[in-house]
Image (cartoon, rainbow, N blue to C red):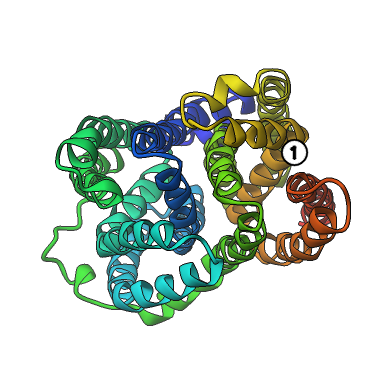
Amino acid sequence: MKDWILNERIDRVLFRLAIPAVVASLSELLLNLGDTFWVSFLGDRSVAALGAGSYIIWIIFSLIDIAESSIISIISQKIGSGRREEANTIFARLSVFFLLLFSLMVIPGIFLSRAGLLMTGVEEVVFEKAFLYVSITLVFLPSMLIFYAISAATQAYGDTRSPMEATILTVLLNLAIDPIFILVLKLDLAGLALASGLSRILGTVYVWRRFKRTSGFEIGILRREWRKVDLKLGVKALNIGFPVSLGGISFSLIYFYILKIVAEFGTNAVAAMAVGNRIEGITYLFGVGYYTAVATVVGQSMGAGKTERAKQAVKRAFLHTGVFAVLMGTLFFFTPDLFGRPFLNEELSLEILRNYLRINAFSQLPMIYHVVLEGAFVGTGYTLPNFFIPIPFWLLRIPLSLYLAFQTPLGVNGVWASMFITQSISTVLLYVWWVRFIKNQ
């Protein structure tokens, strides 16, 4: 049934959309943890470099969110209103627009990333490893954009299985060649970036073939839709996606300063935070799966004039994700070594990570609810709250971290405490905005 998203029981719809997206997201997490595992053989300094470079990678993925969010929002609403052919044309034109835009970002991105990494004050060897890792990743930016744009369009049509399959294929290939590039060829973090970029290209080919098969997309690659750069449509997409992206970019830039604070406590603290961020990704990426599901359901429901169904989608998603977040928080608090020992070698790094996970165990529920609410706003096409709510509280983490870390006995644990405090307040305010917004629709 074509309109199953609009008519089947909401829990069933969320499960059908979210589970493949969750599997795809957690596959990405498996890749991140696998990367960290192989890099750990090179020592805690290489793990710290991976962590420092990851804040640049977060910016890259935040930029890709512009394309993902706008494609899901625009296309899902077109599909919900029954305009499938128009949705096909929009996807083709947006793909061309974003491919050109992201290709122009590669060279400036390399120079800016160097400046950003220098600002963190990490050891020179950590800086050199991180910069090489980021530079090679940026070379593959256009192919990354295409992979995620096609995946977003496929999800907007209601097919989350094909992106899941493409992601799993990419992850398995990546994990298989990681040790060859990193340890056998001794390319260090450069090998990590090469393995990721090459495997993503194969995943792009797979998801494109699946997208054409499942969506009924029939616009040939030589048709005029691919040759026209639609600036008006591109600006509309930027207006939808940029607030979402700017939130992620701001988060990453703020974390450069947070990293500078943490670096005052030594490379062990930097390595511990790098691993802690990845471990928290278990909860976060589970939420991202529901972000996709909620954005699709809300988008199609709003397009069809079914506001009440959009409200119910968010409520039920809270229930589904809340159970998972509480489970992960419990594990973080009581069994932190289960997550830390595979990735860190030095006892001091492990002790710092234990405190990180125990404090941030309480952040898991507000964090995952925040992700669900962001997906809801993306589905409506009204994404300003995703920018205006989180960023002030991410900024607040800087003075709060400085105060708690250096003016109280907490030390580096004060940085972790600031994460919990600001995340909780931000989520409450984003929920209040959602309730008021949806009430007026």
Q: Quadrant of the N terminus?
A: top left
Q: Amino acid at mark 1?
A: Ser
Q: Is residue 75 visible?
A: no
Provide the residue designation for mark 1. Answer: 363
Instruction: Provide residue 430's location: percent of width, then percent of height.
Output: 78, 53
Instruction: Provide residue 35's location: percent of width, then percent of height.
Output: 36, 37
Looking at the image, the residue that sits furthest to the right is: 408
Q: Observer-nearest residue: 312 or 290?
A: 290
Question: Could you tell me which residue is drawn at 68 percent across and 28 percent down?
Answer: 325
As drawn, is 172 to the left or to the right of 349? left
Task: Classify 10 Å Cα crowding around label 1: few (below 14), some (14-19), many (20 and above).
Answer: many
Secondary-structure class at tag 1:
helix
Instruction: Provide residue 348's location: percent of width, then percent of height.
Output: 61, 35
As drawn, is 20 to the left or to the right of 246? left
- Total labels: the figure holds 1
As drawn, is 342 to the left or to the right of 190? right
Instruction: Provide residue 72's location: percent of width, then percent of height.
Output: 47, 53
Q: Observer-nearest residue: 253 or 77?
A: 253
